[in-house]
Image (spheres, coloured by chain):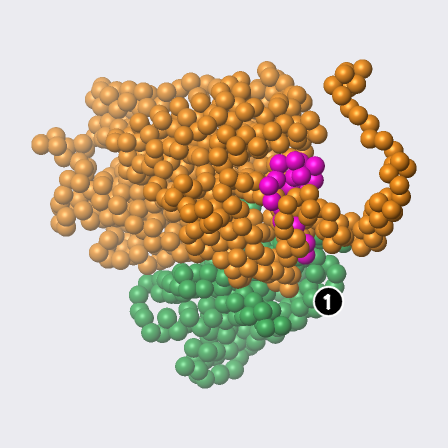
Amino acid sequence: MTWLRRIRFPLLLMAGATLAPLLGRAGFLSESKWLYLGVAVTYAAAALSLNLLMGYAGQISLGHFALLGTGALVSGVVTSADRGGLPFMVALPVCAIVGGVVAFVLGLPALRLRGLYLAVITIGFAYVADQTIFKLNYLSHGSAGIHLPRPLVNTFSFSRTSDFMGILCVLLVVIWQVDRNVTRTKLGRAFHGIRIDESVAASFGVDPRRYKLLAFVISGAMAGVAGSMYGHVYMFVNNESFGFEKSLLLVIIVVVGGLGSRAGVIVSAFFYALFGVVLTHISWLHIFRGFDILIGAALLMYTVSRHPGGLAQAFQESRDRERRGTPDEEAEEPALPKLPEMPRPSGLPERPTVEGLSGSVPVLAAHEISVRFGGLQAVNAASLAVPRNKIVGLIGPNGAGKTTMFNAMSGLLKPNAGKVELLGQDVSEMPAHARARLGMGRTFQLIGLAGDLSVTENLLLAQHVVASYGVLSALTQIGPSRSVERELRDRAAEAISALGFERFANTPVKRLSHGQQRIVELGCVLVTAPEVVMLDEPSAGMSPGAAENLAVRLRDMRDDLGRTILLIEHNIPLVLDVCDELYVLSGGEILAHGLPDEVVQRPDVIAAYLGEPAAAAIVEAEAEAEATPVKAKPAPRKRTRAGAAK
Amino acid sequence: MGQVLVLGLVYGVIYSLFAVGIVLVYRGSGTINFAQGEIGTFGLFVAWWFTTAHHLPWIIGAVAALVMAAALGAGFEWAIVSHMVEANRVSVAVATIGLLAFLVAFEVRFFEGGNIRKMVAPIRGTGWSVFGVVVSPTQILSLLAAGALAAGLALLLKKTDFGLGVLAAAQDPVAVRLVGIPLARVSAFVWGLGAAVSVLGALFIEPTIGVFTPGFASEMFIKGLAAAVVGGLTSLEGAFVGGLLIGFVEVGANRVFDFPGVKMFSILFVMLLVLLVKPDGLMEGFKFRRRALA
């Protein structure tokens, strides 16, 4: 919703922070109503925290209110007079740390795996927190509960909730800013990449486990702070304050508000926090008790299944369609422009380079790779080597194991046997993202880009390995993160203008045509100047003209940019045109290796492609042709430029 | 020790039932139905309405609850999940969280308040003493029913084309469609069956526990979830082994330690341990080794 985007929440909240104490003193709203508003602010903070995890990183926490509860109880221990007796401002960072640590402990086992394990573990944590941890006498005094004092500055106590609202609003602004810093830096892009496709993210050098865990830790820290706010608003919590149904409510708030939409989530949180209050104050509305959850849950199911981007986005998209018409699908396929020299970026991790390699060592080599899927031997002891500054082709019939071989070499799957060497270094034990950091770039058969990110954002994501600044610098925007981000943006802009894509810089990639996406994908791979580029069927879906253009650009990449390329292709003319060496994979084994022209003449290679009888027929026909006198052959038609012009 | 074994078996079998439902949905749709347990509670409310409020025989209430659950599960698949074929599996799980929230809110709003609800047992009687533990006829019946269900499922899944389609659906949807098994029907079947199995578990465990409230079966479901995860999340044998393991762990820990919530605590602990040491679960490992030998 456009009006939502126009509201500047930080400004609004800062205004709230200043006005609330004044209004409260002027007698505007009763103390109990200020309390509800205060609770609404803490719900907004909690919802932002869950939104970071669910909306950005695509992981579910079903025990988020239990994290809030942990924060509240820790805050109680730290601040209450009979125990810690420390000020509220000291409790906040403690709560953030405790929330982050709890998230780390839960996330470490759960996020090593793909799938829904975090949801499973957090639902378990919600019950354990409810039944065990929150009942610990030291933390909560059981059902008797604990008192959380309001902050005290000199002699001024924030005992009026309208005064305390000032602090709450400022805290929400801080959380908002941290969240915005996440989305502005490599963190947000990495989270997004993981959510869309972990393999693609890894090919850009993002460690999926690390970033999933990081998302949960940041989210947990925010939840800890939100919990502390919650506790000090109510000034009382006991073991029953943080039931499982509140965690469910939080999920509803975030999904209905729009996954990934800060503003939508805050509006939704205020609605849910205040709806119940309105009901209790207007008696005839009482029959609608509980309907907020019922309607919210129904809306959630509807939204997720029909408009995954949330209601706000669904609305926005329908408006966009009216205004702009359908995506750019029919646009004419652009020719791949000459790719510019991309100097090796400055922030690149220390790594061996092609230049340091002694002459005979290949840039990339696979030794005796075997991959088994259950009973199927997909690749069997296949070896290949890609020498420096060469284009090496890998062809083979469908199902020969080409992409499996690629995946084994790039680290997306672990071969049952064999060794992979990159720049003379054994990388067999390295996961995909680490190989990407060492200078291995790859494309995917289906486009390896984040479809709903713009061209610019994809180029920024692709530079993940170069974005060498720490998490804290990213979250606070202090230190190197700003200048590094500026460099990345410059570089992305440079790449975009080289590709001739200025017009599409801010267009989501999924709105581009297939051919355009291929070009963006190539740009993303080359933007970090990798030592070796692995291309999985780059000409798939291209017209013959575009494929010829691709051949020219591949040679450019080898000759002008000095890249080394491993190429999977089905387009044999293209392969014959550009490759210096050719490997043929058939039934998971290397059938032939040599110069392209020679390899494709071999009867066994023809047989692998066309089947034995057809191959025999071809060989026979060729033998016959050779036996017959030359003059019987039809004279080859000379195609001159003039002739073609007629 | 004997008591731990008997009680662990009694509870473990119920968790196995929940776990089997979870594994079925996971194999068929590649996701977890987080509302599955609460459909069980909903079934209890339905069964209670027939048996206690209207004094009909147990079997009528049970059948009505099972039919309702199967319809609810399959209906949810039809209304929501079938529209999400292209969607991320996490999104489907989020949709089931919506159903969970809906069911809990519905029960709280319309069923709660007033009387304490207790479901009658399918069979009355004092039961028998085994190792000093009184085993009720209902508990014996639940063991038999779980055995029958396991046998029936094994027959269906391993011996029929449709069953093989169920097992292969999440792994290779295209192949399943190519051999002529309608994926939509496979999907509706697993969601319906998963929900019905939940009700079965809830009906059998309720008399042992006593009172039920909204959220009752979700707690059983979470233990079933732990069982499924321990068993590898994709293996039906693993679901049974995991269920029994969780049952023994829970009863054993409850005997050794004494603090509130010791059962759930020990279960979470075991689940985290298994995920750390053997992320693919106990049973998948067995299966893999068997395949590697062959």
Depth order, front residue of A367/B215: A367
Give the x, y percent position of residue A69: 31, 47
Asked whether the viewer can see residue B133, the reply is yes
Which residue is drawn at the image coordinates 79% and 53% (left, top)?
A611
Q: Residue at x 43, y 34 (%)?
A: A528
Name the image quarter holding residue B189: bottom right
Q: Is A537 left, or right, of B219 in this rendering?
A: right
Determine which residue is flagged by label 1: B159
Q: Residue at x 13, y 45 (%)?
A: A85
Q: Does the magenta run of residues contain B94? A: no
The picture places residue A331, in percent across and down from the top left corner, at 65, 21
Relative image position of residue B177 (x, y in whole percent): 73, 50
Within the image, what quadrant is residue B248 found in?
bottom left
Chain letter behind tag 1: B
Chain A colour?
orange
Q: Is residue B46 visible?
A: no
Where residue A437 appears, x then y in whole percent? 41, 43
Residue B138 versus residue A512: which sits nearer the camera? A512
* Position of residue B28 in the picture relative to residue A143 (left or right): right
Quadrant of the image for the N terminus of chain B? bottom left
**How many numbered discs sit on the rendered protein?**
1
Tell me the crowding category of disc 1: few under 14, some 14 to 19, or many 20 or more residues within 10 angstroms, Cα based: few
Q: Residue at x 31, y 20 (%)?
A: A11
Instruction: Say which of A492 and A168 sits in front.
Output: A492
Quarter of the figure that contains the C terminus of chain B:
bottom right
The span picked out in magenta is: A567-587
Q: Is residue B118 above or below residue A278?
A: below
- Compare residues B82 and A617 and report the one nearer the observer: A617
Chain B colour as displayed: green
